[in-house]
C-alpha cells in the first residue's frame, strides 16, 4: 500500500514539472484545465454577486454608512493628531490596551465590506471578535484579564451578552434557524441554500448597526486611551460628530433614549 502511494506521489511531482525534453508537449497533467476555467468562472460569478449586494447596501443603508464613516473620521483624526507624540505614561496595562485597540481598528474595513457584500455569516464572526475585543479591554482595565482565557460575556459593554450568544451561533453554525435565514434561498421550484451571497436588507441593516455600535465603542476606548497617555481631550466638533453617529443608532433601535 505504501509503495503504491509513493509511486503515485512520484508521478504527481513529475507531472507538476511540466513539459520535459522527451515530451515537449508536456506529460499528462493531474489537473484538468476545464476545472481551472470553471473555478475562475465561479470566482467571477461570486464576485459579481458580492458587488451587486454592495450596490444595494450602499443605497438602503445610506444613513448607517454615514454614521460609520463619521466614526472612522474621528478615529483617523485621533491617530493623526497623536502620531509621534511622546507618551506621558506607559505601563503593561496601557500597552495591552494599545494592542487590542489596534487589532480592532485593523479589521473595521474588512467587517464592513463583509456586510455590504452579503457575507453575513463571515461578518457575524468578525462582529463577534469586535465584541470580544471590547470585553477584553474592559477586563484589562479592571485588572481581571487572564491570558489564554475566553472573554467573559458579562464584561462586554452595553449588556451585550445576549447579542454575544447570537453571534456565537454564527461562529459555530449551531442555530439552524439563523443559518437558514441567512443563506436560505426560496424559489418557485423549492427551497435551497445559495452558494453565492444574496443581499438581505434586514440582515444587512441589523449587522451593520451592530458593527457600527462596536466601532463607536472603540472610538470611546481610543479617546480614553489617548487621554491617559497624552492628555488628549475631544473638541466640541469631535463630540458633535460622535453624537450624530449615536443618534443614527438610536433611530435604528440599537440604543434607547433614557427617560
Image (cartoon, grey):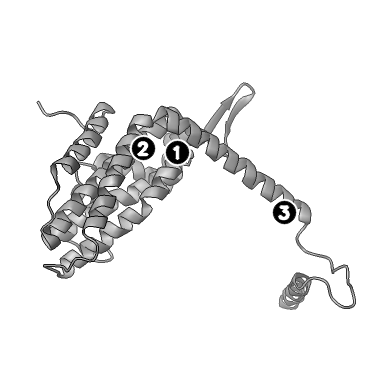
Q: Secondary structure at mark 2?
A: helix
Residue 90 in percent (x, y) is at: 14, 69
105 to 96, vertically: above or below:
above
Residue 4 in percent (x, y) is at: 76, 74
Dot 2 surroundings within 10 Å: few (below 14), some, or many (20 or more)? many
Q: Is residue 80 visible?
A: yes
Residue 244 in percent (x, y) is at: 22, 34
Disc ID at residue 36: 3
As measured in the structure, the alpha-carbon distance from the residue carrying label 2 to the one carrying label 1 is 8 Å
Q: Earlier in the sequence, mark 2 or mark 1?
A: 1
Query: For this view, does 113 lie left or right of residue 247?
Result: right
Q: Earlier in the sequence, mark 3 or mark 1?
A: 3
249 to 29, vertically: above or below:
above
Residue 31 in percent (x, y) is at: 75, 60
| Residues at discs 2 and 1 in contact (Cβ within 8 Å) | yes
Question: Which residue has dot 2 on it?
Answer: 208
Q: Earlier in the sequence, mark 3 or mark 2?
A: 3
As measured in the structure, the alpha-carbon distance from the residue carrying label 3 to the one carrying label 2 is 35 Å
Q: Secondary structure at mark 3?
A: helix
Question: Which residue has dot 1 on it?
Answer: 116
239 to 205, vertically: above or below:
below
Q: Is residue 143 visible?
A: no
Amino acid at each position: 500500500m505504501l509503495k503504491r502511494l509513493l509511486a503515485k506521489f512520484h508521478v504527481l511531482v513529475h507531472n507538476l514539472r511540466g513539459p520535459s525534453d522527451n515530451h515537449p508537449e508536456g506529460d499528462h497533467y493531474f489537473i484538468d484545465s476545464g476545472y481551472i476555467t470553471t473555478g475562475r468562472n465561479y470566482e467571477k460569478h461570486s464576485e459579481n454577486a458580492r458587488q451587486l449586494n454592495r450596490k444595494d447596501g450602499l443605497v438602503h443603508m445610506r444613513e448607517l454608512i454615514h454614521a460609520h464613516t463619521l466614526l472612522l473620521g474621528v478615529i483617523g483624526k485621533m491617530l493623526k493628531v497623536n502620531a509621534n507624540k511622546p507618551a506621558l505614561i506607559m505601563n503593561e496595562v496601557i500597552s495591552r490596551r494599545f494592542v487590542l485597540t489596534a487589532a480592532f481598528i485593523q479589521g473595521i474595513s474588512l467587517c464592513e465590506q463583509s456586510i455590504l457584500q452579503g457575507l453575513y455569516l463571515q461578518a457575524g464572526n468578525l462582529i463577534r471578535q469586535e465584541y470580544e475585543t471590547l470585553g477584553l479591554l474592559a477586563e484589562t482595565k479592571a485588572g481581571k484579564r487572564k491570558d489564554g482565557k475566553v472573554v467573559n460575556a458579562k464584561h462586554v459593554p452595553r449588556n451585550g451578552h445576549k447579542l454575544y450568544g447570537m453571534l456565537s451561533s454564527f461562529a459555530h453554525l449551531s442555530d439552524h434557524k439563523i443559518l437558514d435565514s441567512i443563506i436560505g434561498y426560496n424559489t418557485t421550484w423549492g427551497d435551497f441554500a445559495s452558494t453565492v451571497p444574496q443581499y438581505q436588507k434586514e440582515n444587512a441593516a441589523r449587522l451593520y448597526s451592530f458593527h457600527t455600535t462596536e466601532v463607536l465603542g472603540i472610538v470611546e476606548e481610543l479617546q480614553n486611551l489617548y487621554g491617559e497617555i497624552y492628555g488628549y481631550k475631544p473638541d466640541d466638533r469631535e463630540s458633535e460628530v460622535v453624537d450624530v453617529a449615536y443618534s443614527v443608532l438610536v433611530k435604528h433601535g440599537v440604543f434607547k433614549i433614557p427617560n
